[in-house]
Amino acid sequence: MFESKPIKTRKGSKHDKSGCLTCRKRRKKCTENTFPVCGHCLRLNLECVREPPRRYSITRREASMSGSERSGQNSNAIPNLRFQLSPIQHCSQSSHDRELMKYYVSFLAKIVAISEENNSFLTVFLPMATVSPSVFQALIAWSSGHLSIFDDSYKLTALKARSRALGAMCEVLSTKASTVPDQEANLATALVLVANEIGLNSGSEWYEHLKGARDIIISAESSGPGGRSLQGSQVFKTSSDGQWLLRNFAYHDVLSSIISGRRLLIEDNYLDDISVETDSYLGAAFPVMKLISKICSLRYPHARDQEIDQFLTSINAFWDNCYYLESILQEWTCKSTTKTSLSALANSYRSAGLICLYRHMRTWAMEDFAGPGYSKQELCMMISNAVDAIMTNLSLIPVTDGAVCGLLFPLFIAGGETTEQKHIETIRSRLSYMLKERGFQNVRRALDILEQVWQQSCSGSSHDESGMMDWATLLEGSEEMLILT
């Protein structure tokens, strides 16, 4: 064994390149160049600023290697290292926030949007952040939270940023917002916090923020043209930014409701008079999401609540609504000018919506028939056809296309209904790639649930009418809510 030698401190020199930046700025020798604070800075009570270490940038080939092949490389590094961030622990608070905002603009905001040409995460959230401390702090929390997924050294930073964001949110909510821009900023803050918690898969905390967003919407008040009083969602419809915030809220509300079976947080028809050609979350699929929201509102009547004649009338009305929604979904088409990948994504949502509707009808089918029309066997066949349609549209969306970020919902719905191995492998591959590239942990949870479905269905341990293990059964026994946004 070699004897350990005592560590010597550098005495510094006029041209010492390893000295602290504070001494170099003051044109002084960095005497007693000790870490973390040098002798000069300690004596004068100055902040001893050090030059941050440089990050080693791996090549694209190295990024694709397995952990054992990289010889010590961090397998949780930011995907493809498309953005380089200075180590947070060496930054002042202002530099720290600037670096995290740079990460949001250069990376995070781009991987959550369908396309760069119509990215409301940049065109709406960023201008708000310049005038609203709560929006700014929420974006910082989202950025640091996403970074912490890939690098454990950012976990403490993420917790502190989240705490500041919640504090800023509490502060702005302590007084009633008097202007529309202030109410929009409050709603934006809540929705950013929703997105952060979803990405971290933090239990059901995202749902608490979503309920907070609901309260902000329904309590909003303003004066419209001619002094007309505006309330609730109507307040946000007065601007394009406000309409996108409503679509953002609806996206989370509808897709969480269709999976959990819970009622929508806002059940009125506030989406009916909102239209958009390309949405940042949904691309061309926003009209389909409005139809899916109608499926969420379907409720099978119960005899105990009504007289027998009224009950039978309610049953007929239920099935009439089912068949009406089915016909609308089947007839819906994208505009011919829509980009191929966005059209394929929208059609995938349409097929996923049909699967959700057929599942609903299958649940309430009386004996062998769903109302006056389909048998359970026919419904299972129609679900299988819709799965095939999703897989066909999936082949039209390259893995590098921005439309990939909207695929989680149709992929999960299709994966929960298929027994074909080729479909299972394709869905598993796509979800694994999404997780690797974007890191959002709700994707990991969705994939874990599908793996359980596939495993138990193959073993024959538990089945529904279709011969599949039902993912809804797995979710019923879990305390964690699944969100596919």
Image (cartoon, rainbow, N blue to C red):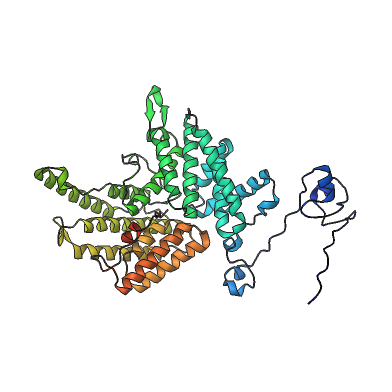
Who is closer to the viewer here, 161 or 251? 161
280 with respect to 17 (left or right): left
Residue drawn at (25%, 55%) of the image: 360
The image shows residue 313 at horizontal and vertical percentages of 13, 45
Residue drawn at (46%, 44%) of the image: 191
Residue drawn at (62%, 57%) of the image: 153
Give the vertical position of 183 relative to 23 (above or below): above
The image shows residue 446 at horizontal and vertical percentages of 41, 61
Please identify the quadrant where the N terminus is shown.
bottom right
209 with respect to 254 (left or right): right
378 with respect to 470 (left or right): left
Specify whether residue 437 is in view: yes
Count the labels in the image.
Answer: 0
- In the image, farthest residue toward the right: 14
The image shows residue 70 at horizontal and vertical percentages of 62, 72
The image shows residue 321 at horizontal and vertical percentages of 21, 48
Specify whether residue 396 is in view: no
Residue drawn at (38%, 25%) of the image: 229
Give the vertical position of 123 relative to 404 (above or below): above
Who is closer to the viewer here, 102 or 156? 156
